[in-house]
Image (cartoon, helix red, strand yellow):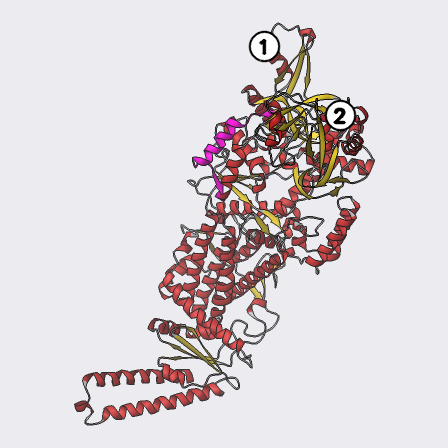
């Protein structure tokens, strides 16, 4: 068959082993229910358990085996476009967090969905060396365990220590990704410092240098004095300080106070005047080279047309008063101190006015030489000493609270300084322009498109990118300083020292060779530089890159690194390969707790993937927090706050939910939102949802064994052949299945995964389990074997197709249940387009109206006081005014009885007769339908319902007799008009029809 794949060896049917005897497959039967029967797969000895237990279903994850469906489910189409995606590489700094799990869940869902559609997929895994982050972790470990610094070891031995750490961590990270079910192509795994990546990094640097896009210059850069290295903007956390606040700074025994504005007076030379400047960083006063005011500031207009100098009281020299339109007149006194060596605004203003630079703070955070008594002081000790000195000179004019942003290094927690240092930079203006044009021209799509504004904002104001770091762990910069002819020097980018010599000789042929020295720059490259090459370096660049693998079709990552990573990949990809590295960018939000707070150990709201997968008690959670305190991660105050937060959020701990429940919960959020609220309780709810599907599968297998044994029922073909005689509810569930398949496809196409998970929950919960499966039970008995066999085919088909839609989110559950379903069938449906052919909107509208009535009936039963508690005792009366609805109710009478747990259903065609019945509960589900419930005093037909039926029959008989007597009168045909006679005949027909219906119910 064109759309069927026979699975060899899976055609053997399941055998049912019952521990109790009794008719389990229809309501009212005694003994165990169908869903409690334990099924054994013939020939394998493997049982399908009585309930869904994630630890058993997902047990293969412990060995790192990724769940995969039988190959028949993933048939590649020759004409299908490829789907290539790259995993944002986790840092080799420790365990995976929920953000990694979110990325893995999203990308794996996309890859599995692409396979479902017949596309050839390539999902490339890898890990990032994470220069600063990894070096900091290893340095802390060395200090704690062996009381050693990297300088004690030396560069080579320290790098060996980092490499040992990397090897130790990468195995656990790899296993964690496999346990999440991420179906990556591990044969393509890379490490950002492996041999190939090193070649690619050198090639990229050399090419960019030779094109004039990389240059060396002295410029202001973010500096961590603890790390003694430049850091990137993404590693700077700006913390808002409201007024005087004490902050712990590495290297200081006492906290340092921030959030104070200090006013300092500069004396005007040759005058009694003074100009007061305000600063939150008084230690930089030592490096002031000017004071600036706005040219239109009336407070200083009398100084506008003459040269004015101020006296610097520490350096004992004059500094100029300058006028510049960039000065903010509303800040303080309108006069600002200019320190070009430690402030970006001052640096640019200094360039415009050709001012000198005076550097105050060195790489270690100490005051440099030539500053008298302050030389060598740690910068914040120098701050206090300087304020005392100025106070003695009567130059302090007060302090006041000030709200400010304090830049902290995310790695070292040190306050970030701006230092003027020689560094390597990438010219970004032209590349940034091309990256903006790509989005404007529609060649690169950003999803959600609300981030396009952020894209343009960043790139339109893009500064040159500082790519050098003063670290040991990372790609050493492939640049060589060549010194020759005495004091001359030239920087050359080369792939090796030998190539550097060759290049130098070509550039300086007359230089004396015996007087030439070559030394490679000891610094390393910013981690983002090597990461920015990954779309093409991971697919073979600078060697041959197959068009089948590059460009990528999608780059999926967090929106917080849109500029730091995504924009740089685009810029470098266009420059070095001439192509955009990917066609589309999908940005997901930041994981927060259920209240929208950022997850933080100090808040006690951190949830790790393992917490959700395996569960964790409150006691173990608190033990983890106390361990973080012992390791110095949490202070005593933070520990107390963390423990209190855990007691409030997780009073009973976190229950075991499993991998699939974690994945399904993560994808059930709108991942395109700026923040994603995660609630572990939702994962537990989804675990219960999976158990619902599990029980439905057990019921289906039990039914298949009983009514389909030996027939090797071909699901798809039999269903097509019986479509014209198929019961309404079977056609309805197939229509709902087709709709669900379509909703999932549309959701994936728009990256609205939450709509796909919602559609699947609606189908399995509300349609399949709560409605259709219940309606099949009435026919699961020997005398209805032909209908039962058809139900089995529909049940298996819906589960097989439905679970294949679930598989992108729940690979372990899908693999387990589909294996059992395949064993119960001679073939499996792999053409899911066929499911779309069952969609019947008109039928769904009709059935939905009936189900709405059933829902109303159940509510009426539950809300009646005293409650109608006995499931099968009530008799249901329904009057439907609309002929179409009345016809649907007539056809689905047995279904209504089954779904509402009633003992009988009486359908009325006359509202007046309906009104004569005494009901214990009634209602109006729709404007043209009435329902009423008659409660039986006991089981069967001898209660109040039966008595009401006898009374109605008697009343009908009386009305019919009266009408027959009128019509039979001798003068009736002569005296009654034709219209009256017609009306009487129609009434008689209606009453007789009602009488027949009542007699059927009584029987």
Residue under the image location 58 percent in, 40 percent down: 87
Which is more foreground, mark 1 or mark 2?
Answer: 2
Where residue 139 appears, x then y in whole percent? 76, 34
Where residue 27 appears, x then y in whole percent? 52, 74
Q: Is residue 63 left or right of residue 535?
A: right
Residue under the image location 57 percent in, 71 percent down: 33
Q: Considering depth in this image, is 897 or 383 the residue closer to the camera?
A: 383
For disc 2, the marked residue is 313
Where residue 636 appears, x then y in whole percent? 79, 49
Q: Earlier in the sequence, mark 1 or mark 2?
A: 2
Q: Is residue 870 visible?
A: yes
For disc 1, the marked residue is 506
Query: Residue most toward the bottom?
Result: 970
Q: Is residue 617 visible?
A: no
Residue 434 inside the magenta-drawn segment = yes
Residue under the image location 75 percent in, 50 percent down: 625
Estimate how packed mark 1 is, as few (under 14), some (14 to 19) or many (20 or more) residues with alpha carbons within 10 Å: few
Q: Which corner quadrant of the image does residue 689 belong to?
A: bottom right
Q: How many marks?
A: 2
């Amino acid at each position: 068959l064109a759309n069927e794949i026979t699975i060899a060896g899976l055609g053997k049917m399941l055998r049912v082993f019952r521990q109790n005897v009794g008719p389990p497959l229809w309501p009212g039967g005694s003994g165990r229910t169908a869903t409690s029967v334990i099924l054994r797969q013939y020939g394998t000895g493997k049982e399908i358990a009585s309930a869904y237990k994630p630890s058993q279903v997902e047990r293969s994850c412990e060995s790192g085996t990724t769940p995969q469906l039988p190959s028949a489910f993933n048939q590649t189409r020759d004409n299908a476009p490829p789907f290539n995606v790259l995993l944002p590489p986790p840092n080799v700094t420790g365990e995976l967090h929920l953000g990694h799990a979110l990325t893995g869940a999203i990308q794996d869902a996309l890859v599995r969905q692409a396979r479902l559609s017949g596309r050839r997929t390539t999902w490339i895994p890898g890990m990032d060396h994470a220069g600063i982050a990894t070096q900091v972790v290893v340095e802390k470990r060395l200090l704690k365990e062996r009381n050693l610094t990297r300088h004690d070891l030396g560069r080579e031995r320290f790098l060996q220590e980092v490499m040992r750490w990397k090897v130790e961590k990468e195995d656990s990270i790899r296993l964690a990704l496999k346990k999440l079910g991420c179906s990556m192509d591990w044969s393509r795994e890379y490490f950002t410092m492996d041999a190939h990546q090193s070649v690619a990094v050198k090639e990229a640097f050399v090419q960019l240098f030779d094109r004039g896009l990389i240059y060396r210059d002295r410029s202001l850069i973010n500096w961590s004095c603890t790390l003694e290295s430049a850091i990137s903007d993404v590693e700077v956390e700006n913390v808002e300080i409201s007024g005087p606040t004490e902050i712990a700074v590495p290297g200081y025994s006492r906290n340092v106070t921030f959030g104070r504005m200090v006013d300092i007076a500069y004396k005007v030379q040759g005058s009694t005047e003074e100009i007061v400047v305000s600063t939150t960083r008084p230690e930089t006063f030592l490096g002031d080279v000017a004071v600036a005011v706005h040219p239109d500031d009336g407070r200083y207009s009398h100084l506008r047309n003459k040269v004015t100098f101020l006296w610097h009281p520490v350096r004992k020299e004059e500094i100029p008063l300058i006028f510049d339109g960039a000065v903010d007149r509303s800040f303080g006194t309108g006069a600002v101190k200019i320190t070009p060596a430690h402030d970006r605004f001052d640096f640019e203003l200094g360039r415009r006015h050709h001012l000198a630079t005076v550097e105050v703070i060195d790489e270690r955070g100490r005051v440099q030489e030539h500053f008298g008594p302050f030389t060598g002081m740690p910068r914040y000790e120098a701050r206090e000493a300087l304020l005392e000195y100025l106070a003695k000179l009567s130059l302090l004019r007060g302090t006041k609270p000030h709200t400010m942003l304090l830049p902290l290094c995310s790695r070292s927690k040190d306050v970030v300084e701006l230092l003027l240092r020689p560094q390597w930079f990438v010219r970004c203006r032209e590349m940034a322009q091309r990256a903006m044009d790509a989005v404007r021209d529609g060649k690169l799509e950003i999803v959600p498109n609300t981030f396009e504004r952020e894209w343009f904002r960043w790139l339109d104001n893009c500064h040159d990118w500082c790519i050098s770091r003063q670290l040991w762990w990372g790609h050493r910069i492939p640049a060589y300083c060549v010194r020759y002819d005495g004091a001359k020097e030239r920087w050359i980018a080369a792939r090796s020292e030998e190539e550097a010599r060759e290049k130098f000789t070509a550039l300086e042929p007359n230089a004396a060779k015996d007087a030439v020295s070559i030394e490679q720059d000891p610094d390393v490259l910013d981690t983002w530089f090597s990461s920015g090459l990954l779309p093409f370096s991971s697919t073979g660049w600078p060697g041959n890159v197959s068009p089948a693998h590059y460009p990528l079709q999608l780059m999926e990552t967090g929106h917080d690194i849109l500029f730091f990573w995504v924009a740089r990949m685009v810029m470098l990809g266009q420059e070095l390969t001439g192509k955009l590295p990917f066609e589309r960018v999908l940005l997901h939000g930041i994981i927060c707790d259920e209240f929208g707070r950022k997850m933080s150990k100090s808040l006690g709201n951190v949830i790790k993937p393992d917490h959700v997968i395996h569960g964790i008690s409150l006691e173990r959670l608190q033990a983890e927090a106390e361990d973080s305190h012992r390791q110095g991660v949490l202070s005593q105050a933070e520990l107390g706050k963390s423990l209190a937060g855990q007691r409030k959020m997780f009073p009973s701990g976190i229950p075991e939910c499993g991998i699939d429940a974690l994945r399904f919960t993560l994808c059930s959020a709108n991942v395109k939102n700026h923040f994603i609220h995660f609630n572990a309780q939702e994962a537990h709810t989804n675990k219960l949802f999976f158990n619902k599907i599990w029980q439905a599968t057990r019921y289906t297998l039990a039914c298949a064994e009983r009514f389909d044994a030996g027939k090797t029922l071909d699901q798809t073909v039999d269903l097509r052949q019986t479509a014209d005689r198929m019961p309404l509810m079977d056609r309805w569930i197939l229509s709902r299945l087709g709709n669900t398949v379509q909703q999932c496809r549309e959701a994936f196409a728009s990256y609205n995964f939450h709509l796909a998970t919602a559609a699947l929950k609606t189908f399995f919960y509300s349609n399949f389990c709560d409605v259709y499966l219940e309606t099949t039970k009435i026919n699961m008995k020997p005398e209805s074997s032909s209908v039962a066999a058809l139900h089995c085919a529909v049940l298996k088909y819906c589960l097989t197709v439905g679970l294949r839609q679930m598989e992108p989110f729940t690979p372990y559950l899908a693999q387990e249940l589909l294996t059992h379903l395949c064993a119960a069938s001679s073939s499996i449906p792999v053409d899911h387009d066929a499911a779309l052919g069952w969609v019947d909107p008109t039928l769904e509208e009709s059935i939905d109206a009936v189900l709405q009535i059933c829902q109303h009936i159940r509510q009426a039963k539950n809300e009646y006081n005293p409650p109608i508690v006995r499931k099968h005792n009530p008799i249901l009366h329904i009057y439907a005014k609309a002929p179409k609805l009345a016809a649907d109710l007539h056809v689905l009478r047995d279904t209504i009885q089954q779904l509402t747990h009633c003992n009988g259903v009486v359908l009325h065609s006359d509202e007046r007769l309906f009104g004569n019945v005494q009901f214990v509960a009634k209602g109006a589900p729709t404007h043209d339908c009435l329902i009423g419930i008659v409660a039986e005093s006991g089981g069967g037909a001898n209660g109040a319902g039966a008595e009401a039926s006898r009374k109605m029959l008697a009343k009908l008989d009386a009305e019919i007799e009266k009408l027959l007597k009128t019509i039979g009168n001798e003068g009736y045909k002569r005296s009654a008009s034709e219209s009256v006679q017609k009306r009487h005949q129609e009434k008689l027909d209606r009453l007789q029809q009602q009488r027949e219906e009542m007699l059927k119910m009584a029987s």
